């Protein structure tokens, strides 16, 4: 069993490792993000209570592998094809069900949402972007880690969320100021954005009954790390990366 504090600790630890990997090696970061995507794929269907967990997890895992391969061997533009195939895969999964297909719409939307998360995660490890993307990776991950630590504090939900946002913004400001390729203002904005996201996801999925079980809890802990990936990549390009 994993409580809210444990999930927050896993998120903080994962963010710290992402920041370190982003600083050391793009290949190491790619392997780490793919591993997080596979952990997410194993727990996401159980977290949101999909009627078929195994098949849904397989579809999401295959999309994660395909998206990672496309980004590393091709370009980010190729992800459009992966997203299209992911939607087709979600419907094929439903066609292969032999349980009468209850909660069909919920199942399809849950699988497609999971696929969207792992596709977005590949933005962290895009080979283009150079120093700017690497610096933003460190800035974003450091801000997520700071926000996650705040969500683990034994305080009221509203106070914890506000504190996580402010502390993440400060972490982004300091990290961005220290990394010339990012700058203080960009770091502050990135920190505030991921702080709000981390706090919101922690509160939202903490209300799901399954979030106390190990695999669903790990999926919930991985969400704040995976979702911002493509946004980080796009900001890097706006900054000239």
Image (cartoon, helix red, strand yellow):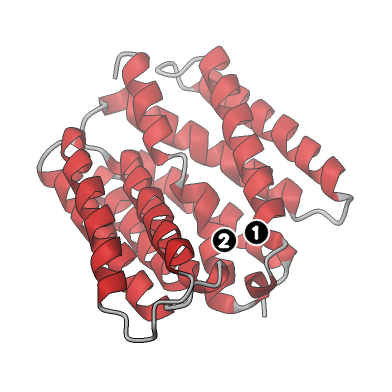
Seen as rendered, the residue at the extreme front is 100
* Residue 93 placement, left or right of 104: left
Q: In what quadrant of the picture does the C terminus appear?
A: top left
Does dot 2 land on a helix, a strand or a loop?
helix
Judge whether 234 appears above or below 110 on screen: above
Q: Residues within 10 Å of mark 2 (few under 14, many from 20)?
A: many
Picture residue at 31% right of the left edge, 20% below the top? 237
The label nearer to you, 1 versus 2, is 1
Picture residue at 21% right of the left edge, 30% below the top? 128
- Residue 107 image point, x, y percent: 44, 66
- Residue 122 image point, x, y percent: 31, 45
Picture residue at 43% right of the left edge, 57% below the top? 109
Residue 199, by quadrant, is top right
For the residue pair 179 and 90, the one nearer the viewer reads as 90
| Residues at discs 1 and 2 in contact (Cβ within 8 Å) | yes
Alpha-carbon span between mark 1 and mark 2: 6 Å
Would residue 123 be visible to someone looking at this image?
A: yes
Residue beneath disc 1 = 205
Does dot 1 land on a helix, a strand or a loop?
helix
Which of the marked residues, 1 or 2, is nearer the chain's N terminus? Answer: 1
- Residue 163 image point, x, y percent: 79, 37
Judge whether 232 appears above or below 184 on screen: below
Would residue 16 be visible to someone looking at this image?
A: no
- Residue 25 image point, x, y percent: 28, 45
Q: In what quadrant of the picture does the N terminus appear?
A: bottom right
Residue beneath disc 2 = 220
């Amino acid at each position: 069993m994993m409580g809210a504090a444990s999930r927050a600790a896993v998120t903080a630890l994962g963010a710290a490792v992402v920041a370190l990997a982003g600083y050391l090696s793009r290949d190491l970061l790619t392997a780490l993000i793919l591993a997080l995507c596979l952990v997410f794929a194993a727990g996401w269907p159980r977290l949101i209570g999909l009627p078929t967990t195994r098949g849904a997890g397989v579809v999401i895992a295959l999309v994660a592998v395909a998206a990672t391969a496309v980004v590393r061997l091709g370009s980010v533009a190729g992800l459009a094809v992966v997203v299209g195939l992911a939607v087709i895969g979600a419907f094929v999964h439903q066609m292969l069900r032999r349980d009468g297909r209850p909660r069909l719409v919920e199942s399809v939307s849950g699988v497609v949402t999971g696929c969207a998360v792992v596709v977005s995660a590949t933005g962290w490890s895009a080979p283009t972007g150079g120093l700017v993307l690497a610096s933003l990776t460190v800035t974003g991950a450091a801000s997520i880690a700071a926000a996650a630590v705040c969500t683990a504090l034994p305080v009221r939900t509203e106070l914890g969320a506000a504190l996580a946002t402010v502390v993440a913004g400060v972490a982004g400001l300091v990290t961005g100021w220290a990394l010339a390729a990012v700058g203080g203002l960009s770091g502050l904005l990135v920190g505030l954005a991921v702080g709000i996201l981390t706090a919101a996801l922690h509160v939202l999925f903490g209300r799901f009954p399954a979030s106390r079980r190990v695999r669903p809890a790990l999926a919930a802990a991985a969400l704040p790390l995976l979702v911002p990936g493509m946004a980080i990549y796009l900001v890097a390009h706006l900054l000239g990366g």
